[in-house]
Image (cartoon, rainbow, N blue to C red):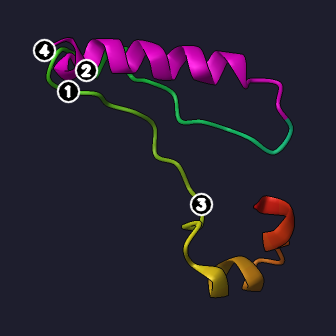
Amino acid sequence: MGELDLRLESSAASEFAANTESDKGFQLPRINWNLSGKNVMTMDWAEGISAGDNAALDAAGHDRRKIG
């Protein structure tokens, strides 16, 4: 049942974000703690391109080999 408690997921996501805070080119959405709870995990919106959308990655000028 602990796996279903989204407060634990939110905490882990928050810790992961803190651990990667200074990683260049890597950003994670922040947890909105005021809107999160046991059954809801609310995060900032993350803009990006799906890793499976090769055409969009190429159009944006990303090197898919480097990403991989």
Q: CA distance from mark 4 to mark 3?
A: 32 Å
Q: CA distance from mark 2 to mark 3?
A: 24 Å
Marks 2,1: beta carbons within 8 A: yes
Q: Earlier in the sequence, mark 1 or mark 3?
A: 1
Q: Earlier in the sequence, mark 2 or mark 3?
A: 2
Marks 2,4: beta carbons within 8 A: no
Residue drawn at point x = 56 percent, y = 14 percent: 15
Query: Which label lies toward us, 4 or 3?
Result: 4
Q: Is residue 45 above or below residue 44?
A: below
In the picture, residue 32 is in which quadrant?
top left
Q: Is residue 18 magenta?
A: yes
Q: Which residue is mark 3?
A: 48
Q: CA distance from mark 1 to mark 4?
A: 15 Å
* The disc label shown at residue 64, or none: none
For the magenta stretch, what is the residue range? 1-23
Q: Which residue is mark 4?
A: 1
Residue 63's x, y, as percent? 85, 72
Judging depth in this view, the residue of 50 and 44 nearest the camera is 50
